[in-house]
Structures are given as C-alpha cells and as structure tokens.
Image: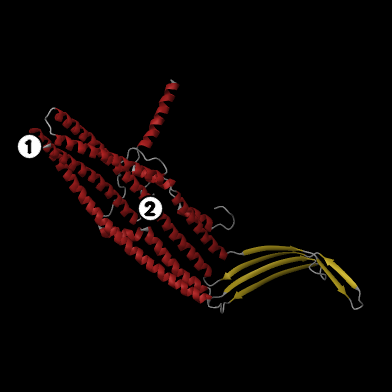
Amino acid sequence: MNRIFLILYKTTLIFFFCSICYSQTLYDTLSKAYNNSPLLKSHRFKLEAINEELAKALSKNRPQVNLSGSVGSDETTTVNTSGIESTKNNNPKSVTLEIQQNLYDFGRTKSLINIADNSIFAQRADLRNQEQEILLEASRIYLALLASTEINKLAKNNLLLLQKHYQATEDRFKLGEATSTDLSLAKARYYRARSDEIKSRGGIEKERSKYFSLIGIEAPKKLYFPQIKIALPEKLKDITKETLQGNPIIIASGFRKKLSFIKISSAASELLPTLDLNLSAQNAWAPNTFFDEYENYKMEFNLKIPLYLGGYNYSNIRQKKKEAMQSSKILDYNIKKILKEVEILWIEFKSLEAQIVSINAAIKANEMAVEGVKKENEVGSKILLDVLDAEQDLLEEKVEAVKVERDKYITIFNLMAFMGKLSSSELNLDVGVYDLDKNYDAVKNMWLGFED
C-alpha cells in the first residue's frame, strides 16, 4: 500500500512540474525576468553604492579621532669650551591622541547631505526605469512568441487543408474530372502553404531563442494572451497626468535638476568660514636630553576664512550654474519627448482597437464566403481558384488578427511603462520585491563596519 502511494505521489510531482514547464502565463514570465535579470541586479548594486554617498556626507558631522605613536633613537655629541667631548644617548617615545570636531561649516555638510539624497532618489528612479525596461522587453518577447505560435497553428491547419485539396484535385485529375490547370493551382497553393508553415516554425525558434536569452530558461510550449491587471485611463489627458507623476525618466530628471541647483549652494558655501574644535593629548618619554617625561594637553578653536584661492571657487560656482541650466533643459526635453510618445501610443492603441473590431467582422464574413464558394464550386458555378482564394483571404485575416492582438497588448504595456505602472509591485508579481530602504537605512546610521 505504501509503495502504491509513493508511486502515485512521485507521478503527481512529475506531472505538476511538467505542467509548469509546459504552460506559463505572461506574469509567470515577468516574475522570472525580474528574479533572473543580471542587469537589474547590477543596477541594485549601483544604487547601494550611491547610498554610501549619504553615509560619507553624514560623517562630516562626526568627530575624527586619530591615535599616533613614535619611537626612535637620538644621539647628541657636544664639545665644551675646554675641548672636552661628551655624548648622550636617549630613546624618545611618544603617544598622541587627537580629536577634531567641526562646529560650524556654514551649510557645507547640509548641502552634501542634500546632494547625496537627491542622487539616491534619482538613482532609485533609474532602477525603476531599468525594471520597467526588463519587464517590457519580457512582455514583448512573450507576446511575440505567443503570436508566432498561433500563426504556426494557422499555417499548419492551412497546410493540412491545402494538402487535402491537392490530393483531391490529383485524384480528380486522374479520373479526368479536373484539368491540369486545376492540379497546378492546387499544387502551387500547397507548396506555398508548406513554405509558410516552415517560415512560421522558424519564427517560433527565433522568439524562443530570444526568450531564453532574456529570461534564462527554456520557453514554455503553451502560452496565453494575458489578463490586464491595471486598467488604462479612458482619456489621453488622464494618461498624460499619470505619466507626468509616475514616469521614472521624468522623476529622475527632476531629481537631477534639483541636485544641480543644490550643487550651486554647495559651491557657494566654500566661500564661507569653517569653525573646528581640536583636542589633543600627548605623552612622551625621553623626548630629549633635558626631560625624562613630557605630557601635553591642548584644546583650540580653529577658524578658517578663505580670502582668495586663485579664483577656483568662483569658477566652480559658474560651472555649477551652467550645469543647472543644462539639467533644466534635459528635464524639459524629456517631458516633451515622453508626452509626445504617449500621445502616439494612445492613437495607435485606439487604432488597434478599431482594427480588431473590423478584422473580427471580416473573419466572420470570410468564413461565410468560404462556405458559400465551396457550395457553389460543388454545383459548378465557382472554380477551384475561387475556393483557394477565399480560403487564402480567410487565413490572412486570421493571421492579421493575431498580429493586431499582439500589437494591442504590447501597446498597453508600453503605455503602462510610460505611466510608471509596469513594475513588480504594481503588477503584483509573485516575487520578493527589492526593498529600496533596507540598505539606505542601514548605511545611513552606520558609524563603523564593513558590512551593511
């Protein structure tokens, strides 16, 4: 009994895992792309590296402590007025503890912290954009593979149909019921269908190769057109509004514009004084030939006022102003470019929706036409060429329907990406979503240590 149960259990497991490999939804593919992408992982490490800029900026407010020590040998030879020479040897040793604490730097550290924060937020937007690009490319490949598979099914069905036509025409030709022209037409259409089926199989292999290259696993055999989890706004102005608020490229450009203006303030603060507190304690043994031991404790305030540094600071301010103007223009350009692309995609989406309605109506009409032509061919009012042409028209409409359906979904995912909604969290993918704050919070409050 136990053995039978074990066999059934193993069989169930094998069937379960095979079904996973055989069948896969678009969102399964997106989850795998999110988990497996080395490019996405590299951008996360880049963000974590930039997080360290905040830790370095915060360190400016913390004390600097140095401990130094020295040991040596000193030999002094003297000759007095009587010409008597004497030599003294000693081995000086010392230990010094120094503490330096900035008391006020007139906005330098605050500017560095703001620079670090805005750099981090810009990089977060870049990471989000990279995530969207990977998910968008994965969706394109999945939908392209799905369309190629559906087109291949249509090509196979058409090949079988024309093979039967060819065989039937050949049999009728042998009986003298069909002309050589009929036979040549049937043969030509059969070999054309065969060529189309071979071409469609090549399209599948091409897309499967792309799938493996991006996702890192073999493509599933069975695919489905997806259920859209995020509803598109019904009006272009609503999509435009969401794009301005959520597009990661616009968000990153906005933070970089803000960052460039903060850098002007940071450069200007270099013209202002700094006030530091310095504490030191020193203990020396045999420092010279006059003392056996020496102790020194010192506290001093150090005020440094930059008066003239050769014009460097002024040049730096001018440079930062030009960079701020540049970043402002980049933001303006990105907004105009992205909104224009959104408008074009919206027009394309509406066009595809209308095309789908028309193509579906055309398919129904062509199906009725094929049936009618076949019946008329049976009574002799239509020739074989009419039947073949009607069937070819129906096939082309069905192939076009698959392509338009694919293009519609790709356009939807493109619009979602422009709105900033093509992300693992928005799509509710079955993945462990990367925590943006975990490393940020860890390094921000870390005073010591190599690991975060």
Q: Is residue 313 left or right of residue 8?
A: right
Query: Going 17% across and 36% down the picture, which residue do you hit?
Result: 184
Three-letter code, disc 1: Ser
Question: Farthest residue toward the top?
Answer: 1
Mark 2–mark 1 Cα distance, whole angstroms, equals: 57 Å
Residue 32 can be seen, yes or no: no
Q: Nearer the viewer, mark 2 or mark 1?
A: 1
- How many residues crowd mark 1 within 10 Å: few (<14), some (14–19), many (20+)? few
Residue 149 position within the rendered picture, expressed as x and y whole percent measured from the top left: 30, 40
Q: Quadrant of the N terminus?
A: top left
Residue 313 position within the rendered picture, expressed as x and y whole percent measured from the top left: 52, 75
Q: Is residue 391 left or right of residue 238?
A: left
Which one is in front, 10 or 363?
Answer: 363
Residue 172 can be seen, yes or no: yes
- How many residues crowd mark 2 within 10 Å: few (<14), some (14–19), many (20+)? some
Circle 1 residue: 381
Three-letter code, disc 2: Glu
Circle 2 residue: 133
Q: Is residue 57 left or right of residue 4?
A: right
Query: Going 61% across and 71% down the picture, which residue do you hit?
Result: 276
